[in-house]
Amino acid sequence: MDDLALLSLFALAPVLTVGILLVGLRWPAKYAMPAGYAVVVAVAAGVWDVDWTVIAASSAQGLILAAGLLYIVIRGISANSGTPVCRCAKL
């Protein structure tokens, strides 16, 4: 697949999937985002022949990054409100 337009559509597929599910079908994000992730994995493995170990490592890296961001957000919210949002914010 060397056609740039076709590859661009494949790259846009996860964004379109999430957009259609969130806005068009009014799905909650907890269901739409895993569907978008599944499309990302399918495109990476099927179209660009990315190795499964790279996909797994990238997924783990994303989870670690998301955990760090959630930690910052929870600490920021609990510092401004005076009461902790959850028990993990009492550090």
Image (cartoon, grey):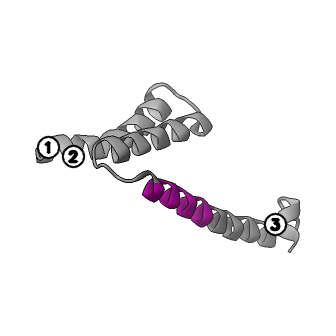
Disc 1: CA contacts within 10 A as few (<14), some (14-19) or many (>=20): few
Which element carries disc 3, helix, strand or loop? helix
What is the spatial separation of the Cα atoms under label 1 and label 3, in whole angstroms?
Answer: 49 Å
- N-terminal of the two: label 1 or label 3? 1
Question: Three-letter amino acid code at disc 2?
Answer: Ser
| Viewer-nearest residue: 82 or 59 | 59
Q: Which residue is mark 3?
A: 81
On the image, numbered disc 1 is attached to which residue?
Answer: 5
Marks 1 and 2 sit apart, C-alpha to C-alpha, by 5 Å
Q: Residue at x 47, y 39 (%)?
A: 38
Asked if residue 11 lies left or right of residue 5, the reply is right
Residue drawn at x 88%, y 70% as measured from the top left: 90
Task: Say which amino acid is labelled 3.
Answer: Ser
Q: In the image, which disc is placed on residue 8?
A: 2
- Going by the image, does 56 lie left or right of 4? right
Range of magenta residues: 53-66
SS label for mark 2: helix
Provide residue 87's location: percent of width, then percent of height.
88, 62
Mark linked to residue 82? none
Which of the two residues, 39 or 88, is positioned nearer the viewer here? 39
Q: Is residue 41 magenta?
A: no
Residue at 61% x, 65% y is: 64
